[in-house]
Amino acid sequence: MPPEYTLTSLFSAPSYLFYMFEKIIPASLRKSAETPVPNPKKWKKQQKQLKKLIKSAKYTTFGRYYDFSDLLQAPHLPTAFQQQVPIHTYDDLYEQWWQYALEDEPDITWPGVVPYYALSSGTSGAASKYIPVTKEMLKAMKKGSRKLFLDLASLPLPKALLRKEMLMVGSCTQLQTVQAHQVGDLSGIIGLNRPKWIKRYYKPTRAITDLPEWGQRIQAIVEAAPTWDIGFVLGNPAWIQLIFEKIIAHYQLKNIHEIWPNLSVFIHGGVFFEPYKTSFERLLAHELVYLDSYMASEGFIAYQGVANSNCMELLVDTGIYYEFIPFDSYHFDDEGNVRLDAKTLNITQIQPKTEYALLISTCAGAWRYLIGDTIQFTDIVRLEFRITGRTKQFLSVCGEHLSIDNLNQAVSSVNKHLKAGIKEFAVAGIKTDQGWKHQWFLSLDHVGLSANQLMEALDEELCLLNDDYATERRYALHEVSLEIVPHELFYQWLEKRGKLNGQAKIPRVLKGTALANWQEFLEENKVKS
Protein backbone atom coordinates (compact mmCIF):
# COMPACT_ATOMS: atom_id res chain seq x y z
CA MET A 1 0.00 0.00 0.00
CA PRO A 2 1.34 3.49 -0.80
CA PRO A 3 2.57 5.25 2.38
CA GLU A 4 0.24 8.20 2.01
CA TYR A 5 -2.80 5.96 2.63
CA THR A 6 -3.80 5.31 6.26
CA LEU A 7 -6.21 2.71 7.66
CA THR A 8 -8.80 5.40 8.31
CA SER A 9 -8.73 6.51 4.70
CA LEU A 10 -8.61 3.02 3.24
CA PHE A 11 -12.25 2.85 2.13
CA SER A 12 -12.99 6.54 1.96
CA ALA A 13 -10.37 8.03 -0.32
CA PRO A 14 -11.51 8.05 -3.97
CA SER A 15 -7.90 8.30 -5.14
CA TYR A 16 -7.06 5.05 -3.35
CA LEU A 17 -9.95 3.28 -5.02
CA PHE A 18 -8.60 4.39 -8.36
CA TYR A 19 -5.18 3.14 -7.31
CA MET A 20 -6.61 -0.32 -6.53
CA PHE A 21 -8.63 -0.27 -9.75
CA GLU A 22 -5.45 0.35 -11.75
CA LYS A 23 -3.60 -2.48 -9.96
CA ILE A 24 -6.33 -5.12 -10.15
CA ILE A 25 -7.69 -4.57 -13.67
CA PRO A 26 -5.21 -4.79 -16.55
CA ALA A 27 -4.93 -1.75 -18.78
CA SER A 28 -5.99 -3.83 -21.79
CA LEU A 29 -9.40 -4.43 -20.18
CA ARG A 30 -10.03 -0.87 -19.03
CA LYS A 31 -11.88 1.69 -21.11
CA SER A 32 -10.56 5.22 -20.77
CA ALA A 33 -12.75 8.29 -20.77
CA GLU A 34 -11.61 8.92 -24.33
CA THR A 35 -12.59 5.44 -25.61
CA PRO A 36 -15.40 5.92 -28.14
CA VAL A 37 -18.68 4.16 -27.47
CA PRO A 38 -20.62 2.54 -30.34
CA ASN A 39 -23.63 4.52 -31.47
CA PRO A 40 -26.55 3.68 -29.11
CA LYS A 41 -29.12 4.61 -31.77
CA LYS A 42 -27.62 2.09 -34.14
CA TRP A 43 -27.60 -0.58 -31.43
CA LYS A 44 -31.27 0.14 -30.78
CA LYS A 45 -31.98 -0.38 -34.50
CA GLN A 46 -30.01 -3.62 -34.47
CA GLN A 47 -31.98 -4.97 -31.48
CA LYS A 48 -35.20 -4.00 -33.22
CA GLN A 49 -33.97 -5.73 -36.37
CA LEU A 50 -33.18 -8.95 -34.47
CA LYS A 51 -36.57 -8.99 -32.76
CA LYS A 52 -38.33 -8.43 -36.08
CA LEU A 53 -36.40 -11.27 -37.74
CA ILE A 54 -37.13 -13.75 -34.94
CA LYS A 55 -40.79 -12.73 -34.74
CA SER A 56 -41.18 -13.17 -38.51
CA ALA A 57 -39.62 -16.65 -38.49
CA LYS A 58 -40.99 -18.08 -35.24
CA TYR A 59 -43.44 -20.44 -37.00
CA THR A 60 -40.91 -21.73 -39.55
CA THR A 61 -39.36 -25.17 -39.14
CA PHE A 62 -36.12 -23.50 -38.03
CA GLY A 63 -37.94 -21.15 -35.65
CA ARG A 64 -39.85 -23.98 -33.98
CA TYR A 65 -36.71 -26.12 -33.69
CA TYR A 66 -34.84 -23.35 -31.87
CA ASP A 67 -37.93 -22.17 -30.00
CA PHE A 68 -38.08 -18.60 -31.31
CA SER A 69 -41.31 -18.02 -29.39
CA ASP A 70 -39.42 -18.65 -26.17
CA LEU A 71 -36.55 -16.46 -27.34
CA LEU A 72 -38.90 -13.51 -27.73
CA GLN A 73 -39.63 -13.67 -24.00
CA ALA A 74 -35.94 -13.46 -23.02
CA PRO A 75 -34.94 -10.43 -20.90
CA HIS A 76 -31.93 -9.82 -23.17
CA LEU A 77 -32.69 -11.13 -26.65
CA PRO A 78 -29.19 -10.77 -28.22
CA THR A 79 -27.59 -12.88 -25.47
CA ALA A 80 -30.33 -15.50 -25.54
CA PHE A 81 -30.06 -15.67 -29.33
CA GLN A 82 -26.32 -16.36 -29.09
CA GLN A 83 -26.88 -19.11 -26.53
CA GLN A 84 -29.81 -20.81 -28.23
CA VAL A 85 -28.89 -20.73 -31.95
CA PRO A 86 -25.53 -22.14 -33.11
CA ILE A 87 -23.15 -20.58 -35.63
CA HIS A 88 -23.73 -21.89 -39.16
CA THR A 89 -21.56 -22.16 -42.25
CA TYR A 90 -23.14 -22.42 -45.68
CA ASP A 91 -22.72 -26.20 -45.63
CA ASP A 92 -24.47 -26.40 -42.24
CA LEU A 93 -27.47 -24.39 -43.40
CA TYR A 94 -27.69 -26.13 -46.75
CA GLU A 95 -27.45 -29.69 -45.44
CA GLN A 96 -29.79 -29.18 -42.51
CA TRP A 97 -32.29 -26.66 -43.92
CA TRP A 98 -31.83 -24.96 -47.28
CA GLN A 99 -31.79 -28.09 -49.42
CA TYR A 100 -35.44 -28.65 -48.43
CA ALA A 101 -36.33 -25.02 -49.15
CA LEU A 102 -34.67 -25.47 -52.56
CA GLU A 103 -37.26 -28.19 -53.25
CA ASP A 104 -39.88 -25.47 -52.69
CA GLU A 105 -40.95 -26.66 -49.27
CA PRO A 106 -42.41 -23.60 -47.55
CA ASP A 107 -41.55 -22.16 -44.13
CA ILE A 108 -38.12 -23.80 -43.69
CA THR A 109 -35.92 -20.95 -42.42
CA TRP A 110 -38.16 -18.08 -43.59
CA PRO A 111 -41.95 -17.88 -44.13
CA GLY A 112 -43.28 -19.04 -47.50
CA VAL A 113 -41.56 -20.44 -50.57
CA VAL A 114 -38.27 -18.75 -51.49
CA PRO A 115 -38.83 -17.08 -54.91
CA TYR A 116 -35.17 -16.65 -55.94
CA TYR A 117 -31.81 -18.29 -55.33
CA ALA A 118 -28.60 -16.39 -56.04
CA LEU A 119 -25.82 -18.53 -57.44
CA SER A 120 -22.77 -17.34 -55.56
CA SER A 121 -19.87 -16.92 -57.98
CA GLY A 122 -17.45 -17.82 -55.19
CA THR A 123 -13.66 -17.72 -55.23
CA SER A 124 -12.95 -21.29 -54.21
CA GLY A 125 -12.92 -24.45 -56.25
CA ALA A 126 -16.24 -25.56 -54.79
CA ALA A 127 -19.51 -25.77 -56.68
CA SER A 128 -21.77 -22.73 -56.74
CA LYS A 129 -23.76 -22.00 -53.61
CA TYR A 130 -27.52 -21.43 -53.66
CA ILE A 131 -28.27 -18.40 -51.49
CA PRO A 132 -31.98 -17.72 -50.82
CA VAL A 133 -33.29 -14.29 -51.87
CA THR A 134 -36.74 -13.48 -50.49
CA LYS A 135 -39.12 -10.64 -51.30
CA GLU A 136 -38.23 -9.12 -47.93
CA MET A 137 -34.53 -9.22 -48.82
CA LEU A 138 -35.12 -7.56 -52.18
CA LYS A 139 -37.07 -4.83 -50.40
CA ALA A 140 -34.21 -4.40 -47.91
CA MET A 141 -31.65 -4.19 -50.74
CA LYS A 142 -33.74 -1.50 -52.45
CA LYS A 143 -33.84 0.41 -49.17
CA GLY A 144 -30.04 0.29 -48.96
CA SER A 145 -29.75 1.45 -52.58
CA ARG A 146 -32.04 4.42 -51.90
CA LYS A 147 -29.85 5.40 -48.94
CA LEU A 148 -26.76 5.25 -51.15
CA PHE A 149 -28.24 7.43 -53.88
CA LEU A 150 -29.61 9.93 -51.37
CA ASP A 151 -26.10 10.25 -49.96
CA LEU A 152 -24.81 11.02 -53.45
CA ALA A 153 -26.77 14.26 -53.28
CA SER A 154 -24.58 15.39 -50.36
CA LEU A 155 -21.35 14.96 -52.33
CA PRO A 156 -19.74 17.97 -54.07
CA LEU A 157 -21.19 17.07 -57.46
CA PRO A 158 -23.14 19.17 -59.97
CA LYS A 159 -26.86 18.86 -59.27
CA ALA A 160 -27.51 18.20 -62.96
CA LEU A 161 -25.42 15.02 -62.63
CA LEU A 162 -28.16 13.36 -60.57
CA ARG A 163 -30.35 13.35 -63.69
CA LYS A 164 -27.78 11.54 -65.82
CA GLU A 165 -27.99 7.88 -66.72
CA MET A 166 -26.21 5.12 -64.82
CA LEU A 167 -24.50 2.10 -66.29
CA MET A 168 -24.99 -0.97 -64.07
CA VAL A 169 -22.99 -3.93 -65.29
CA GLY A 170 -24.28 -7.27 -64.06
CA SER A 171 -25.35 -10.73 -65.07
CA CYS A 172 -28.15 -11.97 -67.31
CA THR A 173 -31.71 -11.10 -66.25
CA GLN A 174 -33.05 -14.22 -67.97
CA LEU A 175 -33.12 -16.47 -64.92
CA GLN A 176 -33.49 -20.23 -64.86
CA THR A 177 -36.93 -21.31 -63.70
CA VAL A 178 -36.89 -24.39 -61.46
CA GLN A 179 -40.28 -25.48 -60.12
CA ALA A 180 -41.64 -22.53 -58.12
CA HIS A 181 -38.41 -20.51 -57.93
CA GLN A 182 -35.86 -18.86 -60.21
CA VAL A 183 -32.08 -19.19 -60.10
CA GLY A 184 -29.37 -16.81 -61.32
CA ASP A 185 -26.61 -14.45 -60.25
CA LEU A 186 -27.61 -11.81 -57.71
CA SER A 187 -27.02 -8.93 -60.14
CA GLY A 188 -29.40 -10.61 -62.59
CA ILE A 189 -32.05 -11.02 -59.88
CA ILE A 190 -31.66 -7.37 -58.89
CA GLY A 191 -31.77 -6.28 -62.55
CA LEU A 192 -35.03 -8.17 -62.96
CA ASN A 193 -36.46 -6.48 -59.85
CA ARG A 194 -35.01 -3.02 -60.30
CA PRO A 195 -36.98 -0.26 -58.54
CA LYS A 196 -39.41 1.75 -60.65
CA TRP A 197 -37.71 5.04 -59.77
CA ILE A 198 -34.43 3.87 -61.29
CA LYS A 199 -35.70 2.33 -64.55
CA ARG A 200 -35.65 5.67 -66.36
CA TYR A 201 -31.93 6.08 -65.69
CA TYR A 202 -30.85 2.43 -65.76
CA LYS A 203 -28.59 1.24 -68.58
CA PRO A 204 -28.34 -1.19 -70.27
CA THR A 205 -31.96 -1.93 -71.08
CA ARG A 206 -33.62 -5.32 -70.63
CA ALA A 207 -33.09 -6.00 -74.33
CA ILE A 208 -29.37 -6.18 -73.51
CA THR A 209 -29.43 -7.65 -70.00
CA ASP A 210 -31.63 -10.50 -71.25
CA LEU A 211 -28.91 -11.67 -73.65
CA PRO A 212 -27.68 -15.02 -72.30
CA GLU A 213 -23.98 -14.78 -73.17
CA TRP A 214 -21.66 -12.41 -71.31
CA GLY A 215 -19.74 -11.62 -74.52
CA GLN A 216 -23.00 -10.74 -76.32
CA ARG A 217 -23.99 -8.34 -73.54
CA ILE A 218 -20.61 -6.59 -73.61
CA GLN A 219 -20.78 -6.16 -77.41
CA ALA A 220 -24.33 -4.81 -77.18
CA ILE A 221 -23.19 -2.30 -74.51
CA VAL A 222 -20.34 -1.18 -76.78
CA GLU A 223 -22.71 -0.66 -79.71
CA ALA A 224 -25.26 1.26 -77.62
CA ALA A 225 -22.70 3.40 -75.78
CA PRO A 226 -22.94 6.52 -78.03
CA THR A 227 -26.69 6.78 -77.39
CA TRP A 228 -26.30 7.04 -73.60
CA ASP A 229 -25.35 9.99 -71.39
CA ILE A 230 -23.68 8.15 -68.53
CA GLY A 231 -22.93 10.00 -65.29
CA PHE A 232 -22.57 7.02 -62.95
CA VAL A 233 -21.10 3.56 -63.38
CA LEU A 234 -21.75 0.65 -61.00
CA GLY A 235 -20.12 -2.77 -61.06
CA ASN A 236 -17.10 -5.00 -60.63
CA PRO A 237 -13.90 -3.00 -61.43
CA ALA A 238 -12.48 -5.74 -63.65
CA TRP A 239 -15.55 -5.84 -65.89
CA ILE A 240 -16.07 -2.07 -65.99
CA GLN A 241 -12.46 -1.68 -67.08
CA LEU A 242 -12.91 -4.33 -69.77
CA ILE A 243 -16.02 -2.57 -71.14
CA PHE A 244 -14.27 0.82 -71.16
CA GLU A 245 -11.32 -0.69 -73.05
CA LYS A 246 -13.62 -2.22 -75.67
CA ILE A 247 -15.57 1.03 -76.14
CA ILE A 248 -12.35 3.04 -76.52
CA ALA A 249 -10.91 0.53 -79.02
CA HIS A 250 -14.15 0.22 -81.02
CA TYR A 251 -14.60 3.98 -81.51
CA GLN A 252 -10.85 4.76 -81.58
CA LEU A 253 -11.08 7.15 -78.62
CA LYS A 254 -8.34 8.55 -76.40
CA ASN A 255 -10.40 7.94 -73.27
CA ILE A 256 -13.93 7.05 -72.11
CA HIS A 257 -14.82 10.71 -71.43
CA GLU A 258 -14.81 11.40 -75.17
CA ILE A 259 -18.02 9.39 -75.42
CA TRP A 260 -19.39 10.00 -71.88
CA PRO A 261 -18.21 13.52 -70.91
CA ASN A 262 -20.47 13.63 -67.83
CA LEU A 263 -19.10 10.42 -66.27
CA SER A 264 -18.19 11.44 -62.72
CA VAL A 265 -18.90 8.62 -60.24
CA PHE A 266 -17.83 4.99 -60.07
CA ILE A 267 -19.58 2.86 -57.42
CA HIS A 268 -17.59 -0.35 -57.30
CA GLY A 269 -17.86 -3.60 -55.38
CA GLY A 270 -17.11 -7.30 -55.46
CA VAL A 271 -13.31 -6.94 -55.30
CA PHE A 272 -10.75 -4.47 -53.94
CA PHE A 273 -10.48 -1.53 -56.34
CA GLU A 274 -6.98 -0.31 -55.45
CA PRO A 275 -5.05 -2.90 -57.51
CA TYR A 276 -7.04 -1.82 -60.58
CA LYS A 277 -6.89 1.93 -60.02
CA THR A 278 -3.66 2.76 -61.86
CA SER A 279 -4.57 0.98 -65.09
CA PHE A 280 -8.23 2.08 -64.77
CA GLU A 281 -7.36 5.77 -64.61
CA ARG A 282 -5.44 5.51 -67.89
CA LEU A 283 -8.86 5.15 -69.54
CA LEU A 284 -10.13 8.49 -68.18
CA ALA A 285 -9.68 12.17 -69.06
CA HIS A 286 -10.12 13.13 -65.42
CA GLU A 287 -10.44 11.39 -62.07
CA LEU A 288 -13.81 10.10 -60.86
CA VAL A 289 -15.41 10.06 -57.45
CA TYR A 290 -14.92 6.48 -56.25
CA LEU A 291 -17.35 4.90 -53.79
CA ASP A 292 -17.11 1.36 -52.47
CA SER A 293 -20.16 -0.83 -51.84
CA TYR A 294 -20.66 -4.17 -50.15
CA MET A 295 -23.63 -6.02 -51.57
CA ALA A 296 -23.25 -9.76 -51.15
CA SER A 297 -25.63 -12.50 -52.29
CA GLU A 298 -26.78 -12.57 -48.67
CA GLY A 299 -27.71 -8.88 -48.45
CA PHE A 300 -26.72 -5.22 -48.80
CA ILE A 301 -24.26 -4.81 -45.95
CA ALA A 302 -22.54 -1.44 -46.35
CA TYR A 303 -21.44 1.36 -48.64
CA GLN A 304 -19.05 4.29 -48.63
CA GLY A 305 -21.05 7.47 -48.22
CA VAL A 306 -18.09 9.86 -48.07
CA ALA A 307 -15.68 10.53 -50.93
CA ASN A 308 -11.91 10.17 -50.43
CA SER A 309 -12.31 7.41 -47.88
CA ASN A 310 -11.55 3.70 -48.04
CA CYS A 311 -14.15 2.80 -45.43
CA MET A 312 -17.81 1.82 -45.61
CA GLU A 313 -20.58 2.32 -43.06
CA LEU A 314 -22.52 -0.70 -41.82
CA LEU A 315 -26.23 -0.66 -42.72
CA VAL A 316 -28.03 -1.51 -39.49
CA ASP A 317 -31.67 -1.43 -40.62
CA THR A 318 -31.80 -3.27 -43.96
CA GLY A 319 -32.86 -6.76 -42.95
CA ILE A 320 -29.62 -7.93 -41.32
CA TYR A 321 -28.52 -8.48 -37.71
CA TYR A 322 -24.73 -8.56 -37.28
CA GLU A 323 -22.35 -10.38 -34.99
CA PHE A 324 -18.56 -10.48 -35.08
CA ILE A 325 -16.00 -13.17 -34.27
CA PRO A 326 -12.38 -12.11 -33.62
CA PHE A 327 -10.38 -13.58 -36.48
CA ASP A 328 -7.54 -15.13 -34.53
CA SER A 329 -6.18 -18.54 -33.51
CA TYR A 330 -8.46 -18.67 -30.45
CA HIS A 331 -11.57 -18.58 -32.63
CA PHE A 332 -10.41 -20.12 -35.95
CA ASP A 333 -8.15 -23.04 -36.81
CA ASP A 334 -5.28 -22.97 -39.32
CA GLU A 335 -7.66 -23.73 -42.20
CA GLY A 336 -9.96 -20.82 -41.38
CA ASN A 337 -12.68 -22.98 -39.82
CA VAL A 338 -14.53 -21.43 -36.90
CA ARG A 339 -14.00 -23.21 -33.57
CA LEU A 340 -17.01 -24.65 -31.72
CA ASP A 341 -16.44 -22.45 -28.66
CA ALA A 342 -15.93 -19.22 -30.66
CA LYS A 343 -17.07 -16.09 -28.85
CA THR A 344 -19.31 -13.69 -30.78
CA LEU A 345 -19.73 -9.96 -30.23
CA ASN A 346 -22.41 -7.43 -31.17
CA ILE A 347 -21.83 -3.86 -32.33
CA THR A 348 -21.55 -2.56 -28.74
CA GLN A 349 -18.58 -4.86 -28.04
CA ILE A 350 -16.38 -4.33 -31.08
CA GLN A 351 -12.96 -2.62 -30.97
CA PRO A 352 -11.18 -0.63 -33.68
CA LYS A 353 -8.19 -2.12 -35.51
CA THR A 354 -9.25 -5.70 -34.68
CA GLU A 355 -9.99 -8.15 -37.45
CA TYR A 356 -13.41 -9.82 -37.24
CA ALA A 357 -15.19 -12.51 -39.21
CA LEU A 358 -18.70 -11.38 -40.09
CA LEU A 359 -21.73 -13.32 -38.85
CA ILE A 360 -25.21 -12.39 -40.12
CA SER A 361 -28.87 -13.26 -39.59
CA THR A 362 -31.15 -12.04 -42.36
CA CYS A 363 -34.68 -11.67 -43.70
CA ALA A 364 -33.81 -14.35 -46.26
CA GLY A 365 -33.54 -17.05 -43.58
CA ALA A 366 -29.79 -17.07 -42.90
CA TRP A 367 -29.24 -17.56 -39.16
CA ARG A 368 -25.95 -16.76 -37.45
CA TYR A 369 -24.39 -17.39 -40.84
CA LEU A 370 -20.62 -17.09 -41.27
CA ILE A 371 -20.51 -15.17 -44.53
CA GLY A 372 -16.77 -15.74 -45.00
CA ASP A 373 -15.54 -12.13 -45.11
CA THR A 374 -13.25 -10.49 -42.57
CA ILE A 375 -13.48 -6.80 -41.68
CA GLN A 376 -11.71 -4.25 -39.50
CA PHE A 377 -13.50 -1.27 -37.94
CA THR A 378 -11.87 2.12 -38.27
CA ASP A 379 -14.62 4.04 -36.44
CA ILE A 380 -16.84 2.19 -33.97
CA VAL A 381 -19.15 5.18 -33.44
CA ARG A 382 -20.05 5.51 -37.11
CA LEU A 383 -19.54 1.74 -37.63
CA GLU A 384 -17.14 2.35 -40.49
CA PHE A 385 -14.91 -0.51 -41.58
CA ARG A 386 -12.67 -1.96 -44.25
CA ILE A 387 -12.95 -5.43 -45.75
CA THR A 388 -9.65 -7.18 -45.08
CA GLY A 389 -10.15 -10.58 -46.71
CA ARG A 390 -11.79 -13.98 -46.39
CA THR A 391 -11.73 -16.52 -43.57
CA LYS A 392 -10.64 -19.21 -46.02
CA GLN A 393 -8.72 -16.96 -48.42
CA PHE A 394 -5.57 -16.07 -46.57
CA LEU A 395 -2.05 -17.31 -47.18
CA SER A 396 -0.25 -18.93 -44.27
CA VAL A 397 1.56 -22.08 -45.33
CA CYS A 398 4.35 -21.63 -42.77
CA GLY A 399 3.10 -18.94 -40.39
CA GLU A 400 3.33 -15.84 -42.64
CA HIS A 401 -0.35 -14.94 -42.05
CA LEU A 402 -0.87 -12.85 -45.18
CA SER A 403 -4.37 -11.44 -45.54
CA ILE A 404 -6.02 -10.42 -48.80
CA ASP A 405 -5.65 -6.86 -47.55
CA ASN A 406 -1.85 -7.33 -47.29
CA LEU A 407 -1.69 -8.69 -50.84
CA ASN A 408 -3.81 -5.87 -52.25
CA GLN A 409 -1.82 -3.19 -50.46
CA ALA A 410 1.46 -4.63 -51.73
CA VAL A 411 0.21 -4.83 -55.32
CA SER A 412 -1.19 -1.28 -55.15
CA SER A 413 2.07 0.12 -53.80
CA VAL A 414 4.24 -1.69 -56.37
CA ASN A 415 1.83 -0.75 -59.15
CA LYS A 416 2.08 2.91 -58.23
CA HIS A 417 5.87 2.89 -57.75
CA LEU A 418 6.75 0.95 -60.92
CA LYS A 419 3.79 2.19 -63.02
CA ALA A 420 3.28 -1.46 -63.94
CA GLY A 421 -0.39 -1.35 -64.93
CA ILE A 422 -1.11 -4.55 -63.00
CA LYS A 423 -4.59 -5.82 -63.88
CA GLU A 424 -5.05 -9.23 -62.26
CA PHE A 425 -3.04 -11.36 -59.88
CA ALA A 426 -3.20 -14.50 -57.78
CA VAL A 427 -0.74 -16.16 -55.40
CA ALA A 428 -0.35 -19.72 -54.10
CA GLY A 429 1.66 -21.46 -51.40
CA ILE A 430 3.44 -24.48 -52.89
CA LYS A 431 5.40 -27.25 -51.14
CA THR A 432 8.79 -27.99 -52.66
CA ASP A 433 11.65 -30.35 -51.76
CA GLN A 434 13.41 -27.44 -50.05
CA GLY A 435 10.34 -26.24 -48.12
CA TRP A 436 7.60 -23.73 -48.92
CA LYS A 437 7.46 -21.14 -51.69
CA HIS A 438 5.03 -18.46 -52.80
CA GLN A 439 4.15 -18.54 -56.48
CA TRP A 440 2.69 -15.35 -57.97
CA PHE A 441 0.73 -15.13 -61.22
CA LEU A 442 0.25 -11.63 -62.55
CA SER A 443 -0.81 -9.69 -65.67
CA LEU A 444 0.31 -6.16 -66.46
CA ASP A 445 0.48 -3.48 -69.17
CA HIS A 446 4.15 -2.48 -68.74
CA VAL A 447 5.97 -4.92 -71.02
CA GLY A 448 9.40 -3.58 -70.03
CA LEU A 449 9.22 -4.87 -66.45
CA SER A 450 10.71 -8.27 -65.69
CA ALA A 451 9.26 -10.92 -63.42
CA ASN A 452 12.28 -10.55 -61.11
CA GLN A 453 11.75 -6.79 -60.73
CA LEU A 454 8.12 -7.29 -59.78
CA MET A 455 8.87 -10.21 -57.47
CA GLU A 456 11.57 -8.32 -55.56
CA ALA A 457 9.36 -5.25 -55.21
CA LEU A 458 6.37 -7.28 -53.96
CA ASP A 459 8.55 -9.26 -51.57
CA GLU A 460 10.07 -6.10 -50.10
CA GLU A 461 6.67 -4.43 -49.72
CA LEU A 462 5.15 -7.45 -47.96
CA CYS A 463 8.08 -7.55 -45.52
CA LEU A 464 7.27 -3.94 -44.62
CA LEU A 465 3.54 -4.61 -44.30
CA ASN A 466 3.63 -7.85 -42.32
CA ASP A 467 6.15 -8.77 -39.61
CA ASP A 468 5.20 -12.46 -39.71
CA TYR A 469 5.95 -12.57 -43.42
CA ALA A 470 9.31 -10.85 -42.88
CA THR A 471 10.22 -13.41 -40.21
CA GLU A 472 9.21 -16.43 -42.29
CA ARG A 473 11.16 -15.11 -45.29
CA ARG A 474 14.27 -15.48 -43.14
CA TYR A 475 13.48 -18.95 -41.82
CA ALA A 476 10.75 -21.02 -43.51
CA LEU A 477 9.60 -19.33 -46.72
CA HIS A 478 12.71 -19.92 -48.79
CA GLU A 479 11.48 -18.92 -52.22
CA VAL A 480 9.16 -16.43 -53.90
CA SER A 481 8.68 -16.63 -57.65
CA LEU A 482 6.50 -14.78 -60.15
CA GLU A 483 5.11 -15.64 -63.54
CA ILE A 484 3.76 -12.94 -65.87
CA VAL A 485 0.58 -14.27 -67.47
CA PRO A 486 -1.30 -12.80 -70.47
CA HIS A 487 -4.26 -10.88 -69.12
CA GLU A 488 -6.84 -12.68 -71.24
CA LEU A 489 -5.88 -16.05 -69.72
CA PHE A 490 -7.37 -15.06 -66.37
CA TYR A 491 -10.76 -14.49 -68.00
CA GLN A 492 -10.49 -17.53 -70.24
CA TRP A 493 -9.95 -19.57 -67.09
CA LEU A 494 -13.08 -18.09 -65.53
CA GLU A 495 -15.01 -18.88 -68.71
CA LYS A 496 -13.79 -22.48 -68.71
CA ARG A 497 -15.00 -22.86 -65.12
CA GLY A 498 -18.41 -21.40 -66.02
CA LYS A 499 -17.78 -18.29 -63.92
CA LEU A 500 -17.65 -15.62 -66.62
CA ASN A 501 -20.33 -13.13 -65.58
CA GLY A 502 -20.80 -9.71 -64.03
CA GLN A 503 -20.00 -11.00 -60.55
CA ALA A 504 -17.00 -13.16 -61.44
CA LYS A 505 -13.69 -12.45 -59.73
CA ILE A 506 -10.21 -13.94 -59.71
CA PRO A 507 -9.38 -15.59 -56.37
CA ARG A 508 -6.38 -13.78 -54.93
CA VAL A 509 -5.20 -16.88 -53.05
CA LEU A 510 -5.23 -20.16 -54.95
CA LYS A 511 -5.62 -23.34 -52.93
CA GLY A 512 -6.70 -26.94 -53.40
CA THR A 513 -8.89 -27.67 -56.41
CA ALA A 514 -8.74 -24.10 -57.70
CA LEU A 515 -4.93 -24.15 -57.70
CA ALA A 516 -4.75 -27.54 -59.44
CA ASN A 517 -7.31 -26.37 -62.02
CA TRP A 518 -5.37 -23.16 -62.67
CA GLN A 519 -2.02 -24.97 -63.06
CA GLU A 520 -3.56 -27.46 -65.47
CA PHE A 521 -5.11 -24.62 -67.47
CA LEU A 522 -1.77 -22.79 -67.74
CA GLU A 523 0.01 -25.95 -68.90
CA GLU A 524 -2.63 -26.51 -71.59
CA ASN A 525 -2.19 -22.98 -72.88
CA LYS A 526 1.62 -23.23 -72.88
CA VAL A 527 1.34 -26.32 -75.07
CA LYS A 528 -1.02 -24.47 -77.45
CA SER A 529 1.34 -21.52 -77.73
Image (tube, rainbow, N blue to C red):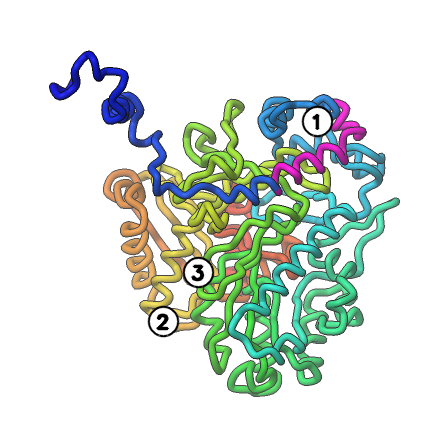
Give, as a three-letter code, the residue at label 2: Lys
Q: Residues within 10 Å of mark 2 (few under 14, many from 20)?
A: some
Separation of marks 1 and 3 at Cα, in angstroms: 52 Å
Image quarter (top left, top right, bottom left or bottom right) of the N terminus: top left
Using the image, tell me which numbered label, if any, was put on residue 125. none
- Seen from the viewer's position, the closer of residues 227 and 417 is 227
Question: Is residue 298 visible to us here?
Answer: yes
- Seen from the viewer's position, the closer of residues 420 and 61 is 61
What segment is highlighted magenta in the picture?
45-65
**Vertical order, 151 against 144 (above or below):** below
Counting labels gives: 3
Say which residue label 1 marks: 72
Place of residue 7 in the rendered image (x, y in percent of width and height, measured from the top left): 19, 12
Instruction: Report the residue that reaches farthest toward the top.
Output: 7
Residue 397 as seen in the image, left or right of residue 17 = right
- Secondary structure at badge 3 equals strand
Instruction: Report the residue that reaches farthest toward the left.
Output: 3
**Disc on the earlier residue, 2 or 3:** 2
Say which residue label 3 marks: 442
Residue 90 as seen in the image, left or right of residue 393 = right
| Residue at x 51%, y 71% (from the top left corner) | 289
Place of residue 316 in the rendered image (x, y in percent of width and height, measured from the top left): 60, 46
Task: Please name which of the two marks, 2 or 3, marks the residue nearer to the observer.
Answer: 2
Using the image, tell me which numbered label, if any, was put on residue 419. 2
Give, as a three-letter code, the residue at label 3: Leu
**Disc on the earlier residue, 2 or 1:** 1
Q: Are marks 1 and 3 in contact (CB under 8 Å)?
A: no
Q: Decide whether residue 100 is among the magenta residues.
A: no
Q: Decide whether residue 57 is among the magenta residues.
A: yes
**Disc on the earlier residue, 1 or 3:** 1
Separation of marks 2 and 3 at Cα, in angstroms: 14 Å
